[in-house]
Image: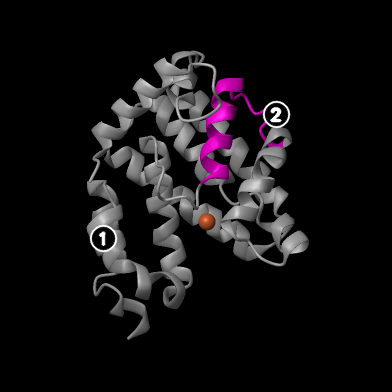
Amino acid sequence: MKNISELSARQAHTSAASPAASAPGAAAAALAQAPARTPADRAALVDDLTLKMIRFYQGNQEDIAHFLKVHAYAARIGRGEGLDPETQLLLEAEAVAHDIACPLCREKYGDTHGDHQMAESAELLSSFLAGTGLTPEERARVTWVVSRHHDYAHVDGPDYQMLLEADFLVNAGENPRKYLVPGYHHMKTVFFRTGTGLALLDAVFPDGADTVCG
Ligand SMILES: [Fe+2]
């Protein structure tokens, strides 16, 4: 099992090998070129993204509540794991925007399967993230992680890992028979890697897969 330190090392190594790629190494590239920001700057950027995302969903209460919950858990995991401020910003931006493709996918495909979200997320994010204050490198990293957030096999950085943990916490609560019953044991013993995420998993589902389903 890879821990978060190993993920960070891999992220930095991959960046050195392909610094221009808007792919695995983009997080480190984004961090290297991040502008000087104060904590208030970062908080304002996330607040603006959040309001923009709420408006994007055009009154869909389920989508709005879902991303707000995922953002809350992701932000908490990042703080609990001591993420540096700029990676924390990337994580929170990814959490806010992670399901941006869902409305389009429902309309176009009749579902929100991961492959369909991967196909549609980048173009939507290109316009959504423009003018938000994120650099091109940061927008590339957010796009990379959001587009692949149903791919659990190629996690390449702590922001990616923490987003998946946060999304599972929310999905399992919203749809326990789909996510919690078949996935709880695997997620707890294999996939969750952060101490904060594991603590939240235990707290949110104190009786494991039986917590909600009985
Ligand atoms: Fe989600």
The percent coordinates of residue 150 (x first, y second) are: 50, 53
Looking at the image, which is closer to me, 157 or 162? 157
The percent coordinates of residue 84 (x first, y second) are: 34, 26
Looking at the image, which is closer to me, 28 or 42? 28
Query: Magenta includes 191?
Result: no
Relative to residue 214, is residue 164 depicted above or below? above
On residue 68, the disc is none
Q: Earlier in the sequence, mark 2 or mark 1?
A: 2
> How many marks overall?
2
From the viewer's perspective, tell me whether residue 33 is left or right of residue 8: right
Residues drawn in magenta = 128-148
Residue designated by label 1: 188
Residue designated by label 2: 130
The span from disc 2 to disc 1 (Cα, nearest Å) is 37 Å
| Amino acid marked by disc 1 | Lys
| Amino acid marked by disc 2 | Ala
Tag 1 secondary structure = helix
Does the rendering let one see residue 135?
no
Which residue corresponds to the image point at 36% horizontal and 79% vertical from the top-left?
212
